[in-house]
Image (cartoon, grey):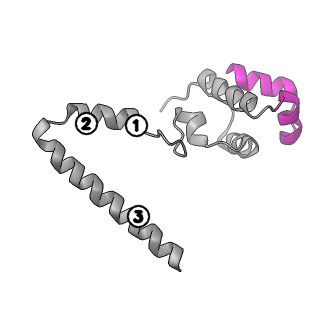
Amino acid sequence: MLIDYKLLGQRLAKCRKEKRVTQEQMAEYLDVSTAFISKIECGRTQINLERLIQICHFLETDPAYILQGTDSASPVYMNGELSQLLSQCPREALPLVKTILEDIIAHYSQASSDKAKK
């Protein structure tokens, strides 16, 4: 997998701005220069996984979102992918897909309920 550092930087900048954090604040937390943060956000420098995790921890964001543009905590996580798959599914298979999904939901609901009781 090739990493698009420009896109990664754009996502980091977006998260930082949404959290109302300045580049200076993030640089101070990471003990790096503001110029380094700027270079990351512009995609002009590569960062290692350890630094990415530090940044994500500071911004309280999911590294999966920064790397892939997906946020597993989002209520609409994978909605597009699932809709696309369902649109390709033969009409006569849809009741089976519905039953399978209901079983999966029931299984995970029961598992969550069991954990809460312990």
Residue position for label 3: 109
Please say whether residue 26 is one of the residues in the magenta stretch: yes
3D distance between C-alphas at marks 3 and 2? 23 Å
Question: Could you say which quadrant of the image residue 92 lies in?
Answer: top left
Q: Residue furthest left?
A: 92
Callout 3 secondary element: helix
Between 88 and 7, the residue placed more toward the observer is 88
Q: Residue at x 68, y 45 (%)?
A: 53
Residue position for label 1: 79
The overriding secondary structure of the stretch rendered in magenta is helix
Residue position for label 2: 86
Q: In the visual, does 16 lie left or right of 108?
A: right
Foreground label between 3 and 2: 3
Compare marks 3 and 2 and give the one earlier in the sequence: 2
Q: Residue at x 13, y 36 (%)?
A: 91
Q: Residue furthest bottom?
A: 118
Q: Amino acid at mark 2?
A: Leu
Q: Is residue 44 visible?
A: no
Dot 3: within a 10 Å radius of its alpha carbon, few (fewer than 14), some, or many (20 or more) residues?
Answer: few
